Image (cartoon, rainbow, N blue to C red):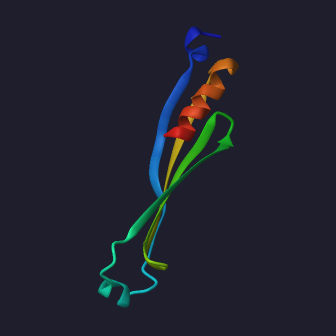
Amino acid sequence: MSDQAQAPVFAIQRVYLKDLSLEIPNAPRIFLETQQPSVEIQMDVGSEMLVEGVYESTVTVTVTTKVGEKTAFLVEAKQGGIFEMRNIPADQMEHVRALLRQS
């Protein structure tokens, strides 16, 4: 085998918006509220091997805005990316996967 065949490969194949949703369950009355809203942000990451050497990494962000106990807005976005990872030494592969989970 040539040296090129053994060279580590890390390449971004695709980055895409996988899902997006917006809910305003208490509209239009929630817009009449004068109380200061509270905002909560949650983030989740995931990864999955699609085929040998090709992985999908996802980042999901959920933003919930409330006025008192009433939900004003609920926004959720999920971004995905497909990454090619080949010939990466086993002792470094977990570090690469951890980076994908953090991105």
For residue 53, what is the image quadrant?
top right
Which of the pair 76/64 is nearer the observer?
Answer: 64
Which of the pair 100/66 is nearer the observer?
Answer: 66
Quadrant where the N terminus sits is: top right
Q: Percent x, y for residue 47? A: 62, 44
Taking the spot 31% from the left edge, 84% from the top edge, the residue there is: 31
Eyeballing the image, is 16 above or below 49?
A: below
Left/right placement of residue 2 relative to residue 22 reads: right
Taking the spot 42% from the left edge, 80% from the top edge, the residue there is: 24
Left/right placement of residue 58 relative to residue 35 reads: right
Q: Percent x, y for residue 67? A: 41, 77
Left/right placement of residue 13 relative to residue 6 reads: left
Which of the pair 85/26 is nearer the observer?
Answer: 26
Taking the spot 57% from the left edge, 40% from the top edge, the residue there is: 101
Q: Percent x, y for residue 14? A: 47, 45
Eyeballing the image, is 26 above or below 81?
A: below
Q: Residue furthest bottom?
A: 29
For residue 65, what is the image quadrant?
bottom left
Q: Percent x, y for residue 21? A: 46, 70
